[in-house]
Each structure stands twice: as structure tokens, then as C-alpha cells.
């Protein structure tokens, strides 16, 4: 049996289990609320695109510890003083809690809870690591994709990143998140199949090199794909390659440029193609692209129709991790907070409300206590998605999520979407939340 | 059924399949050799630690296209002109090729093939994306881990990164690669279980916050783990936390610091612990650590026994992708190369030989043609691992791989292992390889 992660329940940090067993031993079974949020936006990001909720809910629905899982844990020396009752508790454990979430595709800001989990303490604690892992990564990549898509100003973006993703599965999740962020397709066939995304591909240099010369390779490709041939033209000499490709006339769907000065080469390629009558042939550009380079190419007027973006997209190269955290905000009826240097948290269950002007443009958000009324004209971003461990409603389709992402992003003030040094979107805190925070802190002192 | 990548065969770029079908249509069935290598070392890296081969071989052994996979492909418009024969070919396809590889754990340099695949063209082509995805990522992380371990100068490093990895599966592969690079354990329970690594954990702030006060939380933890309690002390006030922890005397296994000035706090914590007689209690430090910060803490004499490293380790934060490529180097008996600007390749199947001095320290490598004899005193790094699709020998254990990584890394010149601006390790090219490269290039012109 090939080595693979098998147990989702054990895909967690050991301390979630040690804490749970200690809670159990003390009979600490109160209901607790945890909130998942990001303390600071990554460099050059004015917003995040919430993503990964669907997988988070699937995980919560399916959470089970098998006998095998439990046998492994029982054998660990650290658990030697844990009573047997804990293992039967774990064996019966299902996620029975409530979840509020900001829907996938919604722009979110620092300090705003994306996910609020209320459940018996052990259930709420155990799920921390998996939820963070999935939501941190998909949100990171959906955000990066949205930036790349914005930079392209209407030209298509395709995810070409599987080979540089953090393993094959990260490539899969990156394909999903990239699509949410606005990509039009992916090179990843399994992601395309499982997610209903359009698979996109051209050819590699090895294809050209496998034939005696470039023309023989092009002929073979056009023979196999008479209506779909996008020929890679830079294996030997790019403009020679374009000239050869142009000889296929109507049958040529496009060319791909993967090296050199893409703006210059695209301009020359366009001229060659047009002069040969291949006016419908598209130009695909690839090669270590990102939002900054694409914005530059667009500004220079490079006649590129589709950008294939790999490494920099699927690793969010300039900001390769999202520091989402999952913090206890209340236990029983009591609000809680931590005061660690530089890592303090706000107590109590919250709601995020978003205000818009008459044109529908978002103006600012307010983080308030969940019990406060939603101000008139504002939208409550956190909505119930799970009650007693069951879904509240069927999931939106990936296309619905993608549309939401596009629509909502366009309603952010333009400066917040700027690729570099974006404006800070205003996020306030309600008076009641501020007061609660002060009280909890003073009580602790 | 939860959404997950299921088909490993379709976990590939679409173009691998379009090229394969075009090869098939032209009857291009010659044997081809592809080599996987990295063009340039990432920033501040003087070497890479080869990692991920085991998963690459498992993939090759298990490669199958199911009827479902094929039905999906047949339904794609791009394949409408592909003859039915291709689909039966794909249905019967197994990997029947030969593989040479540099064993996992070996330090490798830019331009050195880590993996050499010789197989019928279509088989060799189809496997490109998956092999790259797995080997790029694990090599990236094993390399990062080796740097972090070196920086700690004998203090232990534990992988705490699952929550910030690029999804749960990336966290799993990162745990494997981190262990290869020299970590002593992981917080990831499933990775620990499946890989036989030591699981490591302490407690989170939420644990302390779940009780009425810090002391109640500590008492509950020590009650549950009388011999294994590492108490997290920075939820409210770090030094108060250490003083409370110290009251447990012999039962206290250690404390964890997760915020603030770690060098200063570790020094004060050590004094408090020692004065209270807790001389055996260890100090664990965590909080956005990396090799640079750890080197600094070690230099400042911070009395830390174990560093928990998360985000920066499992994402290789300062260099979050490895640009490994997989290039055709010969087809049939004929050597091939590409000449793209800045992306030219060396033709023909190769071998990498490594020279050492009398003390066993590596002095330089030579990339040569695979047919050249290995010079006396040099070691051939590429060894046969698969013949006709079958393994040549059982896989080494993960501990064997980890030992190899440590042993071989220590034999690199010290300057090559420097954390910043490392010395360049000399990699030469044999006269025969240089001549072949010239000939292939001239022939093309």
C-alpha cells in the first residue's frame, strides 16, 4: 500500500489530542466557541478571498476516529495516564457543533473571523489544525489568483502550476482556489475532472525535440488536433517557430511563448501571424509569470490573449503562507482572550458587518459582538452553515463561488485592490466589543 | 463522496496527454530518456537534499488509467480527432521503463540529474508532472529542514507546520521531508503514525484559556501527563507562567515560549526553573522561527533545548518553490537538447560523479556522459533503482535516508553549508559531454 495520509482525524497536531484528553479527564465538556481569522494581511494584499469552506465542512461531517487510529494513540507513551473512558469517547465522537462562516469568494480583512465554531470543547479543539490547513491554503491561493486575474485586465489566466505546487494534492487545492479567484481553467486534468473546470494545455519542448525538426513536430500536432493546436514556438528560435506555425493558416489555434522578452516577442508574433492571415490565432504566454509581470506586459501593450501562470500562482510565491489562527473566544457563557505579547485576541463570539455606498461599493466593515443587531444597510458576513453537525443548505457550486468572488471583489474600493501598497480598507470595532475586551483584560489583571 | 484528487494517472498536465496522443498517432514509440534536474539553486542555498524518490517510484509502479479516467478524456473536445487505438493503448499502459536516481538524502547541485527515466516515449512523457510535483516539493523541504537543523547546532528541531502547510497533504509530505532533513519529530500525528516518526506536542493557548486561571490549566495538564508535561507559559504573562510551571518540580518536563524576545525570556525562564530545582525541565521555543532566527538565538546563547518550527519550514518561506524541470535528453539513440533563451539543456543521458579528499570531504562533482567510465576515487551518484518497471531493491527506511542526509551533508565543505551567501560547490562538465553539446547545437543550426 503506497504511503499516503489516510486518517483525516489524525491529520492534526498532537497537542489537539493531548489537550482533549486533559479536558476529558477534568470533565471539561462545556460548549466553546473558536474563531478562525488572520491577524495581518500578507505583503501587498489589501484583502483576502475566503476559500476552502467546502472542504472544511466535508471534514467536519466526516470526522471519525477508527479503531486503528485509537490503537495508535493508546500506544503512545504520552497517553499512559489517560483513562480508558477517553478512548471510548473518541471512538464515539462526531462533530455535533454549529458553524458560522463567511461564504467562499467573499473578500475578507485582517481580524475578521472567517469561521466561527461552537461545539463541546473537545470537538471544537480537535478540528483546529485541519481547518486551518485547508482554509489558510485555499484562501492564500484564491487571493493570489484574484490579483493575477486583476492584473490581466480581461485576458484569461490559466493555472499551470501542478509541477511546482507543494505536492500533487496541493496542486489540486490550488487549482480549485485559483478558479475561485478567477482563473478560466487549469492544466491539472484530475482537478478539471473532479471540479468541473476547463482543462487547458498546449505542448512542451520535449514534443518538438522528439521529432527530427520543429516542422515535423508541428505537423504531427496539427494532425492530431486539427481544431485545437496551440503550438509551442520557442524550442529553437522563437520567431522562426512562429513563422512555421503560421503556415498552418486556419488550422492554427494559437502559439505559446515560454521564454525571452515576452512583450517584444508577442508583438512580433502577432505581426507574423496577422500577415500570414492567422488573425484568429491566439497568443499564450508563460514562464515564471506573476501579477507584477503581467501588469507590466499589459501596460506595454503585449498582445497576449492567455497567460499560463504556474509556480508563482500555486505557491503564492511572494507571500507563501497565510497566518490564519483559530482562537478560543468563549467557554460556556464566558468570553475569553489571550494577552501574549503581539498576539492578543478579542474575546467573545463576533459578527462582521459590511457597509456600502449608494453605488454598491463597500465603504468599511465593523466587527461587533454576535448579539448586537446588524446596522441598517449593512450586510452580516458570517452566516450559519452548520447546525448540530449538519449542513444548513446545499453547497454553492464552484461557479457560484467564483462569480461571488468576482462580483464582491469589484465592489471593493479600487485602491484596496492595488497590486502594490494597497489602501487600507477600514475595519472598525463596535463600542460593545471594545468594552468587552477591556473588561476581560481587567478581570484577568 | 468528499471532493479529493482520486486518480493519480490524471494528476498530470493536460499537455502530457495531448502530446502522448499525438506521439501515438504518429507511431512515435521509440525509447526516450528524460532527466529531472534543477537549473539554479534557490536563494542562499549551497546544495539541495534529494528527497521524494520513494513516492516517485510508488507512483510509477502503480500507474494505471481506469475506465473512468479514459471516459473522461474521451469526452474532452480536444481529443475528438484521436483514434480509438490510443484509448486502448492508455488502458493497457503500465510503466515499463528504467530509472536511475540519486538516493534520497544525498546533497545535489544545480544541473545534476536527480532522476533519469528511460522508457517508451509516451510512458516517459506522461509521468513528468507527478514526478516533478513530488520531488520538487520534498527536495525543497528536506533542504530547508537541513538548514534549520544546521542552524540549531545540536538542539532539536520539530516540525510544527501542518496548519500552515499548503493543505493537509502538503503537511504530510513536509513532515516526511523535514525528518529526512534532520528534524527529530513532528506535531502531525498521521505523519508520525504512517512514517514512524516521533509525534511531538505541548499545549495551546486555548487550553490555558479554557480554565478559570492559568494555574488550574497547568494542574489539569500535569494531572493528565504526569511525566510528559510541557507547559505553554505565555498566555498571560510569560515569567509568571514560568514561575507557576516551576511549582510542579520534578513533574515538569518543560515549558514552551511562543512570543516575545525568546533569547531574553529563555534565559530568565532557565534561571527561574533552575532556582526552583527544575534543572531537568527543558525549554521549547516556537513562533515564526527559521534558520536565520535560530542561528541568532543560538549565537546569543539562548538556553533553548528544542525549537518548534512551522510556517517557515513547511513552506520553505524564503524560497517557496523549487524549479525542477524534466527534459528530454535523447530519443532512440539520438541525443537531443533545447536552445530556448536562458533555458538551454544538455543533450544525452548523464552520470554525476563526486570526488572527495583524503578526509572524506567532498571536493567537486563532474557531470559526464553515462557511457564514460567513473574516474578512480569518485562515486557515481546516479544508481539504478528500477528496471522494466520493477524495483531493483527494497527501499531504504526513512531512518536510513535521514542518516544518509546527515552524513553526506557533513561531508560538504563548510562554506557550502553557510546559511547566507554560501560558497559555490564546483560542478564541472566532462570534455565528452561538452563536445556532444556543441555537436548537437551545431547540427541543429
Image (spheres, coloured by chain):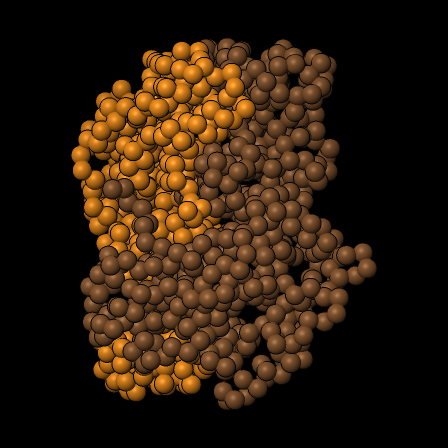
Chain colours: A brown, B orange
Towards the viewer: A293 or B373? A293
> Could you say where residue B381 lies in the image, as x and y percent from the top left?
26, 33
Q: Is residue B145 left or right of residue A314?
A: left
The residue depicted at 59 percent of the width and 18 percent of the height is A227
Viewer-side residue, B375 vs B139:
B139
Residue B250 showing in the rendered view = yes
Query: Going 35% across and 14% down the picture, which residue do you hit?
Result: B30
Above/below status of B436 relative to A374: above
User: Outermost residue toward the left?
Assistant: B393
A395 lies above or below A199: below
Question: Splitting the image into 4 quarters, where does residue A307 fall?
Answer: top right
Residue occupying image coordinates x 27% and y 47%: B405
A92 or B84: nearer the viewer: A92
Q: Position of residue A99 (x, y in %)?
A: 51, 65
- Quarter location, residue A375: bottom right
* Point 38% across, 66% down: residue: A126
Q: In this image, A37 relative to B101: left or right? A: right
Question: Residue B218's x, y, as percent?
Answer: 34, 81
Task: Measuring from the top left, give residue B411's x and y in whole percent.
Answer: 26, 46
Quarter occupied by the N terminus of chain A:
top left
Nearest the viewer among A390 and B158 is A390
- Look at the picture and state if A288 lies above or below A113: above
Badge count: 0
Q: Is residue B151 left or right of residue B315?
A: left
Visible in this render: residue B259? Answer: no
Amino acid at each position: 500500500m503506497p504511503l499516503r495520509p489516510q486518517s483525516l482525524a489524525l491529520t492534526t497536531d498532537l497537542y489537539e489530542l493531548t489537550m482533549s484528553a486533559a479536558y476529558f479527564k477534568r470533565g471539561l465538556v462545556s460548549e466553546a466557541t473558536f474563531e478562525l481569522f488572520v491577524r495581518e494581511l500578507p505583503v501587498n494584499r489589501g484583502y483576502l478571498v475566503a476559500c476552502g469552506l467546502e472542504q472544511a465542512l466535508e471534514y467536519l461531517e466526516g470526522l471519525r476516529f477508527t479503531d486503528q487510529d485509537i490503537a495508535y494513540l493508546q500506544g503512545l507513551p504520552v497517553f499512559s495516564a489517560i483513562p480508558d473512558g477517553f478512548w471510548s469517547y473518541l471512538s464515539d465522537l462526531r462533530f455535533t457543533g454549529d458553524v458560522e462562516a463567511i461564504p467562499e469568494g467573499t473578500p475578507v480583512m485582517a481580524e475578521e473571523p472567517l469561521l466561527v465554531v461552537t461545539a463541546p470543547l473537545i470537538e471544537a479543539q480537535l478540528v483546529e489544525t485541519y481547518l486551518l490547513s485547508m482554509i489558510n491554503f485555499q484562501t492564500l491561493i484564491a487571493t493570489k489568483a484574484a490579483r493575477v486575474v486583476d492584473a490581466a485586465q480581461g485576458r484569461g489566466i490559466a493555472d499551470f502550476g501542478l509541477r511546482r505546487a507543494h505536492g500533487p494534492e496541493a496542486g489540486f487545492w490550488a487549482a480549485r482556489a485559483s478558479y475561485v479567484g478567477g482563473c478560466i481553467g487549469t492544466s491539472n486534468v484530475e482537478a478539471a475532472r473532479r471540479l468541473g473546470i476547463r482543462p487547458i494545455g498546449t505542448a512542451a519542448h520535449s514534443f518538438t525535440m522528439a521529432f527530427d525538426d520543429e516542422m515535423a513536430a508541428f505537423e504531427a500536432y496539427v494532425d492530431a488536433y486539427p481544431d485545437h493546436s496551440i503550438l509551442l514556438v520557442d524550442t529553437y528560435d522563437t520567431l522562426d517557430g512562429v513563422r512555421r506555425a503560421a503556415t498552418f493558416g486556419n488550422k492554427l489555434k494559437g502559439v505559446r511563448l515560454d521564454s525571452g522578452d515576452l512583450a517584444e516577442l508577442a508583438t512580433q508574433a502577432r505581426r507574423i501571424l496577422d500577415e500570414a492571415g492567422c488573425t484568429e490565432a491566439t497568443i499564450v504566454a508563460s514562464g515564471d509569470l506573476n501579477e507584477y509581470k503581467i501588469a507590466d506586459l499589459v501596460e506595454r501593450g503585449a498582445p497576449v490573449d492567455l497567460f499560463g501562470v504556474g509556480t508563482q500562482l500555486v505557491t503564492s510565491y511572494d507571500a507563501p503562507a497565510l497566518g490564519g489562527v483559530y482562537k478560543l473566544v468563549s467557554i460556556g457563557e464566558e468570553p475569553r482572550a489571550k494577552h501574549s505579547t503581539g498576539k492578543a485576541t478579542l474575546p467573545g463570539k463576533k459578527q462582521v458587518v459590511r457597509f456600502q455606498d449608494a453605488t454598491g461599493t463597500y465603504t468599511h466593515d465593523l466587527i461587533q459582538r454576535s448579539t448586537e443587531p446588524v446596522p441598517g444597510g449593512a450586510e452580516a458576513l458570517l452566516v450559519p452553515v452548520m447546525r448540530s453537525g449538519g449542513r444548513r443548505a446545499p453547497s454553492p457550486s464552484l461557479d457560484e463561488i467564483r462569480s461571488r468572488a468576482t462580483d464582491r471583489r469589484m465592489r471593493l474600493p479600487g485602491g484596496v485592490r492595488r497590486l502594490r501598497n494597497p489602501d487600507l480598507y477600514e475595519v472598525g470595532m463596535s463600542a460593545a466589543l471594545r468594552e468587552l475586551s477591556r473588561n476581560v483584560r481587567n478581570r484577568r489583571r
